[in-house]
Amino acid sequence: MELIRRHRIVLLIIFGLIPFLHVSAFAKDRGTVLYEESLSLYRNISVNPDKARDKEIWETIAHAFSSVYESYPNSSKAPNSLFLAGKMYEEIGNRFNSDKDYRKAIYTSRQFVETFPLSNLTDDAQIRIARIYEEMGDKKQAYVEYNRIIEDLPQDDMMTAARKKKSELARYKPTEKEKKQYKYSDSGKPKITKIRHWSTDDYTRVVIHLNKDTTYSSKLLKADPSIDKPPRLFVDINNTAIDNNLYVEPITKGLLEEIKFGRNTKNKSRVVLYINSFDDYRVFALRNPYRIVMDIEGKGSKPNTLFAKDKKSKSTYNPESYPSTGEVDSLRQALGLKIKTIVIDPGHGGHDPGAIGPKGVKEKDINLKIAKELKKILNKNGKSIGIDNVYLTRSNDRFIPLEERTAIAKKLNADLFISIHCNSSKNRKAVGSESYILSFTKNQRNLEVAARENATTKKRVSDLDDILKKYLLSSKINESEKFANYVQKSIYSIVAPKYSSFKNKGVKKAPFIVLIGADIPSILVETSFISNPTEEKRLNNSKYRTRIAQGIFDGIKLYSSEILTASISY
């Protein structure tokens, strides 16, 4: 009872009288004031031999630090208070050989690691946990705790010390049977397995991959010059853990400065993006598998204004008579209207075969062959219409998630994005090609196509409506529609004379993930129905694929002419 009474007296002094002792306190938040006074008491006891021998004073000040964190969790000094509480309990354990206080130090330090995973003190708190277990003689748990620094906190500066201690304690490494007993386990929780990023000077896309569905919240923090902090966008991901093998590619240049990640609380993980500047941002989730996409546009990013606003124009262009050099090229270059870079996206790939024809022909293989043929034509003839760069999102049989394909186009500063696919239908007689642009739709057939290409269900496709609302205002819908119409007409004009059953099924709208966020003229071309035995056979023929590719190229030429004509007539 006497100890409790003394604790209360000291806490009353600290939390009651101190604010009246310093006029400067009025300029600070209460949590900061109480932290500073607790810190002052800590420093005094450290240099006063008589008081340093009084365990109750140490415990009271340690409790005072904990109380600052608990009472004022939003204070800027809350992290420091919790950290020093752990430090003091460790010192009490050392001074008075107290396992009870060692346990308090472990508990408090663990709380710090979980609550403030991005602090520069997190690794110090974690190494304290390891050090205490080692001091208490639990060498196996100490090994596990040192290893946590190496595996879970790879970005921190205690790595060298942790590796050294892990090596010293190697003989205490828990056996397979002991792992559950000693491992600080997160089994069963959704895990962050991968973080990918793409960045240019005015755009960043970050994709966070998880192995299970969960929920999240996001927040933008404005730049704070007083503490030399750039703008930050973070997501808190609920009920998650971080995979021990999580690796983030180094950031070399662009809008994105840094990515930090770690536990925010016991049940939340936080991913923070440090960005040079913000103009706008969007965060959304995709499923099958679950991932969170963070899109950021930086200040100074400019919309693609290839077309004059509200200006309707007609093109009398004929692809057969398109001039390859001379005044048109000079004018286009002078006006800065060249379509210089095109990204071609062969749909599917790797473990995702896409649709499979009656004879076993895989969509992924046909898509890649058509894309390579189109690239070949563009490399040969594209210079005549100002195209300098042609890229494929994949040049071999590998899988690329849909949202990454758009990011690749953005990173390459593409002026046009073309995703190439083969159609499929339950009706084996369905023939012809159709092109899609990004938009809402209630058409069930269009939703079925989108569901198939998105590798999901119609219900999940409908769930994309909220995401589309964030993007359609900045999407080049009109330009994409013009582009798609030219491509459709050109494919038909090239293919139909040779194959009379071929149909132009027109331009349609649907929510395709691969087109979300491109904000350049972007289309998805369903070249032919691989589900139709006749068209499957045609698609497997190089001459037919060349006609499809030539049709797309002619559509690009028509669209390029439209850009110039619209701008000149404006």
Image (cartoon, helix red, strand yellow):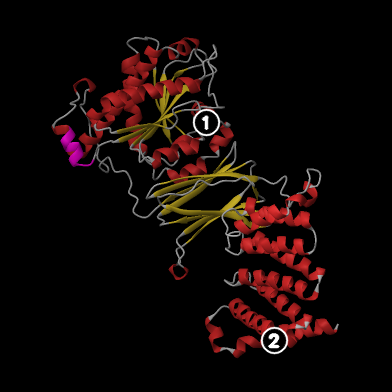
The magenta segment:
329-336
In the displayed structure, 200 sits above or below 502; it is below
Instruction: Judge whether residue 335 is colored magenta.
Output: yes
Q: Which mark is residue 399?
A: 1
Q: Which amino acid type is shown beneath numbered disc 2?
A: Asn
Q: What is the x, y in percent for residue 219?
A: 53, 57
Residue 20, by quadrant, is bottom right
Residue 48 is marked as 2
User: Within the image, what quadrant is residue 236 found in?
Assistant: bottom right
> Between residues 77 and 141, which one lies in front from this camera angle?
141
User: Secondary structure under badge 1?
Assistant: loop
Q: Is residue 339 visible?
A: yes
Q: Main secondary structure of the magenta part?
A: helix
- Tell me which residue sits at (69%, 83%) in the image: 45
Circle nearer the viewer, 1 or 2: 2
Residue 489 seen in the current view: no
Left or right, 102 with respect to 255, comes to right
Mark 2 Cα-neighbour bin, 10 Å: few <14, some 14–19, many ≥20: few
| Residue located 80% across and 47% down the image | 178
Residue 158 is one of the magenta-drawn residues = no
Pinpoint residue 541: horizontal percent, then vertical percent: 42, 12
* Left or right, 121 with reference to 330: right
